[in-house]
Amino acid sequence: MASTKWTVRVDPNKKATLLCEMDDPPVPKVTFPVKLKGICYSPCPINSSNKFAEAGLGDWYWDTFKAGSTTITGWDDLWSRDAASLDELGVNTLRVYCMMSRRKHKDYVPDPWNSEQLFTHQNFLDWCWAAGPNRHLRPIKFVLVGIPVPAEMLWLTQYNQQPERVRTFWREVVRETAQQVGSHPAVMGFTIQNEQDGADVCYNNPTWAAFWWAQVNAFAGIVKAAAPGKLVGMATHDDPQIPARASSYMANCNNIDFWGVNTYQTSVLDVAIGPYAKLNGPALKPVIVTEYGIPATGRRNANDPGSIYDDATTAQKAANVIAKVAPQAFTTPLSLGMYHFEYCDEWWNQPEAPNIYTKWSGPAATGFPNGYWDNDGFGMFSIRRGDGLKPSDDPWDGTHPRKPIDVQTRRPAIFDTIANVYKNAK
C-alpha cells in the first residue's frame, strides 16, 4: 500500500525545506523536496454556502453513502468538471478548507458526538492521488486538509460559554477526521483553523493569548497523534504583530510544523513573510502562503455592491499584480510555496448582490460578460448555472447534486498567469 511521510526543516540561513518520503510499490521508496504550487479548492455550487454546506462547513469531498435504503450521492461531478483544468494549471497540491468525519449542523452539534452519519473521503483522495490502472497518466495532487476548528474552541470568552458536548464534539471529530484521512498517501498535512485569530487573542491580552495558543497546540497535538508522518499547521491573517509580539507563545507550539499566512500583498510578499524570519529558536518554522490572490473584478462605486463589474481589462490588471508577487513565494527562503486564492468564485452568500443566479434572484448584472455577479471576484473562473436550471434552483436535489453542474467561464489572464508562475517555480 502506498504511503507518504512529510517533514520540514529550517537551516541556519533560515532557508526552509519540505521533504516527502514516498513509498509506492513497486517503485522503490524515494525522498524528494517539494515546493507547493497550490490552489485553494472549495467548489461551492451557486445557491449553496461553504458555511452551511450539505455536510457542514464547506465539505464538498465526502463519499456517496447509504441512509437506510436511500443512496446519498456525493459531489464527484464537481471534481470531474475541474480535473483537466487543474492538470493544465500545473498544481501539485490542493488546499481544502474542510473535511469532517461528522456533520456540524447550523445550530447544534450531535450529542453524543458520533451519533449521526459518519462521512468518509476516500474517493476524493483517491482522485487526487490519481489511483487506478491509469494512475501515472495524471499528476498527483497532494492535499492540505482543513479541519475548521472554530473560534468557540480557541477564544477563551467563547470557550467558557460552551457546554461540554460542544467541546467533546470538536476534540473527537478532529481526532476521528485526522485518523480517517491521515493514512492516505495524497494527504500531506492539515490546517486546524483558518483566520480564527485576532489582536486580543493572539498578543494584546496575555490571558486570552495564552489560552488561544495553548488550544492551537492542543488541537495540533490531537492531529499529530492521529496522523503521524503528516504536517500540522494553521492559517492566520497577514498580521506582522503575530510574530513580533506572540513569539513566546509560538515557541511553545511544539505540535505545529509550519505557520500559514493568508496574504494579499500587491508589491512585496516579504512584507508578510519577513516578520516570521525574525523568529528564533522553536518559534522559527517554515511559512506556507496559505492564500494569495487579487480580485479580478472592480467597482464603479466602492460603497455599492451593485456596481461590481467584470471585464478583460480588470482581470488583466489583477493578473499583472499576481505575476509580480506570486513568484516571490518561491524565492523567499522561509517560504515553502503558495496556494492561489482561488480556483473559482465560490461564495454565494450575499443577498444584497444583483445576481440572477441566486435564490433571491436579483436583477441581471449587465456589466458582466455572462450577466451575473461574481461576489468578491476572486478566482480564475466565473460561474453560471447549468443549462436549464432556474436562478432560484437549489443545488441539492434531495439525495444528490442537482444536474447539470455549474458551468465555468475561464478568465484567461488569471489562469494563464498562475500556470506560468507554477511552470517556472523552482
Image: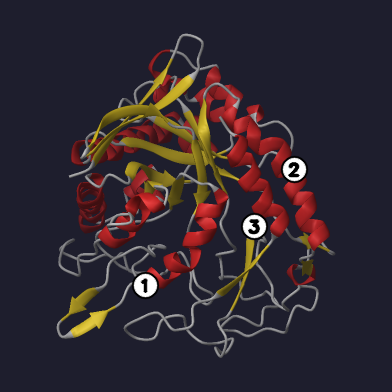
Q: Provide residue 374's location: percent of width, then percent of height.
A: 66, 68
Q: Are marks 1 and 2 in contact (CB under 8 Å)?
A: no
The answer to whether residue 249 of the structure is visible from this angle is: yes
Tag on residue 321?
Answer: 2
Residue 54: mark: 1
* Amino acid type at image mark 1: Glu
Q: Marks 1 and 2, Cα distance to the nearest angstrom?
A: 36 Å
Quadrant of res 100: bottom left
Nearer to the camera, 369 or 299: 369
Q: Is residue 203 left or right of residue 141?
A: right
Question: Which comes before the other along the chain, label 1 or label 3?
Answer: 1
User: Which residue type carries mark 2?
Assistant: Val
Closer-to-camera residue (335/225)? 335
**SS at circle 1:** loop
Vertical arrangement, residue 176 with respect to residue 7, above or below: below
Q: Which residue is mark 3?
A: 378
Q: Residue at x 69, y 36 (%)?
A: 325
